[in-house]
Image (tube, grey):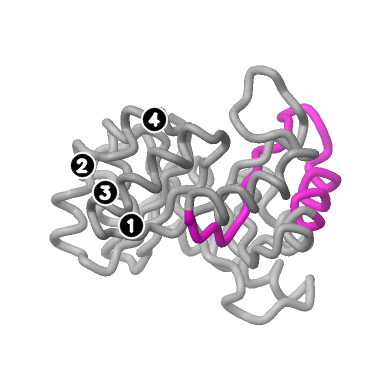
Amino acid sequence: MANAVEQLFAVKARIAAAEREAGRDAGAVTLVAVSKTFEAADIRPVIEAGQRVFGENRVQEAQAKWPVLKAAFPEIELHLIGPLQSNKAKEAVALFDVIETIDREKIAAELAKEIARQGRSPKLYVQVNTGSEPQKAGIEPREAVAFVARCREVHGLAIEGLMCIPPADENPGPHFALLEKLSKEAGVAKLSMGMSGDYETAIAFGATSVRVGSAIFGSR
């Protein structure tokens, strides 16, 4: 996976350039390397090259490879960036350090229960469906600020960020601008937005983390 390591460094260089271009502080943006569908053997060289923050879409897939990797590299931060089913809340709280995809009341309630039961507190983001796409997870933009408030006040969840996946066939800029606006209204500091094709645009709109997979690991 020497190629993945080279591509990792290329992506980091582009993030640094985008930070400078946007007048952001160096290191303001966290790279989440999206390792879904790749085996532990493919991921390990990227870890050994210094990358410590990774994203996975599915709880079950992550359970198959990350406990061993996290035991070997305890400083790894693992993000859940795919939809979370309520029956997987227990496993998600046990394994992930950041859960980015809270988008409905039932998930908020289940996570609150598991956080209290396990005594483990992953960082939490609300996913916003900025394009109001019926096939896509995420809370509607008009409901997002009130939902963040309910997560905090009703369920006692410390929501610290918002996440979005813009429609594939639209200019992502307006979606990133909308998420940034909602984050201010909701009083959250973190913005997870931007993927392999548009992360530099996301950085210009205030992303604090970008989720990059294929630009590092190659096509799946």
Sooner in the amino-acid sequence: mark 2 or mark 3: 2
Q: Contact, CB < 8 Å: mark 3 with mark 1?
A: no
User: Which disc, if any, is residue 86?
Assistant: 4
Compute the Cα span from label 4 to label 3: 15 Å
Asked if residue 197 lies in the magenta stretch, the reply is no
Task: Name which residue type carries label 4.
Answer: Ser
Compute the Cα span from label 3 to label 1: 20 Å
Most extreme residue toward the front is 154
Compute the Cα span from label 1 to label 2: 14 Å
User: Which disc, if any, is residue 95?
Assistant: 3
Q: Position of residue 206 (x, y in %)?
A: 73, 64
Residues rendered magenta in the picture: 156-181
Residue at the (30%, 63%) spot, across then down:
76
Asked whether, in this view, residue 130 is left or right of residue 53, the answer is right
Most extreme residue toward the top is 135
Sooner in the amino-acid sequence: mark 1 or mark 4: 1
Compute the Cα span from label 2 to label 3: 11 Å
Task: Name which residue type carries label 2.
Answer: Lys
Task: Name which residue type carries label 1.
Answer: Val
Residue at the (65%, 44%) spot, across then down:
147
Residue at the (70%, 64%) spot, across then down:
187
Sooner in the amino-acid sequence: mark 3 or mark 1: 1
